[in-house]
Image (spheres, grey):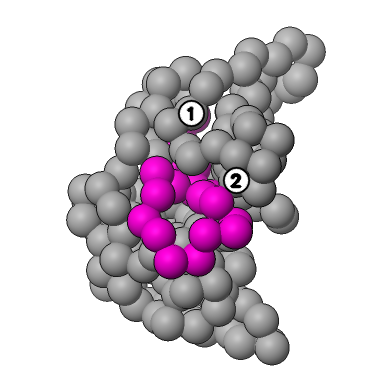
Amino acid sequence: SGSCIDLKKSGEAWIGTGAGGSARVLTTHNFGSSWQSYDSPIVKGDFAGITSIHFRSVKNGMIAGGDLTDTESFTDNIAFTVDAGKTWELASKPSTPGAFYGSDFIRMKRRNVAIVAGPNGADISLDGGESWNKILDDNLWVVDLHPSGMGRLAGQKGNFFKVTLK
């Protein structure tokens, strides 16, 4: 996935892994001189794991993914951290079933805003993953949000959507 790595100018980086029974987060806090590995609660399997990772700050992050072969089930596919990726708590179940390929996580107007996108559509959370609302039904793979509230989602067949949060 194109969004399974997140980098910060201060030397922190996170990599979400998957497939082959793994769903770990690899992290560095010194520009890659040393790395740690932490387990996540994301569903694991031959075609499952983390496909997207985003940190809105050095401590606060989100992972998303799922089982790419299971398009109809609600699995453990979104989690959040408040300790730089050492521990992860599952989010509430999203409105959309199946795996998510892309995600983003920002702080906007004192809210923790998360968007996840996958083949069955996109969901948004305005409360850090406690509740989710479906915003699109299209097959989407990529999400990018800006703290100003502007965002873009893109997917198959050139589908491209603009999101404006207020």
Residue at position x 76%, y 20% in the image: 32
Is there CB contact under 8 Å for labels 1 and 2? no
Pinpoint residue 73: horizontal percent, then vertical percent.
40, 60
Magenta stretch, main secondary structure class: loop
Identified by mark 2, the residue type is Ala
Task: Provide the secondary structure element on which disc 1 rests.
Answer: loop
Up/down of 80 relative to 106, above or below: above
Up/down of 143 relative to 13, above or below: below
Pinpoint residue 97: horizontal percent, then vertical percent.
39, 64
Please state the extent of the stretch shown in magenta in the rendering.
Answer: 56-77
The image quarter containing residue 49 is: top right
Labels 1 and 2: the sequence-earlier one: 1
Of residues 147 and 119, the one nearer the viewer is 119
In screen coordinates, is 159 left or right of 75? right
- Real-space Cα separation, disc 1 to disc 2, in angstroms: 12 Å
In screen coordinates, is 62 left or right of 93? right
Is label 1 or label 2 in front?
2
Of residues 66 and 60, the one nearer the viewer is 66
Crowd rating for badge 1 (residues with CA inside 10 Å; few <14, some 14–19, many 20+): many
Identified by mark 1, the residue type is Ser
Can residue 145 be seen in this snapshot? no
Q: Which residue is mark 1?
A: 40
Pinpoint residue 23: horizontal percent, then vertical percent.
58, 33
Q: Which residue is mark 2?
A: 48
Can residue 72 be seen in this snapshot? yes
Residue at position x 29%, y 66% in the image: 95
Residue at position x 35%, y 49% in the image: 107
Quadrant of the drawing holding the C terminus:
bottom left
Up/down of 59 relative to 123, above or below: above
Query: Is residue 130 one of those drawn in magenta?
Result: no
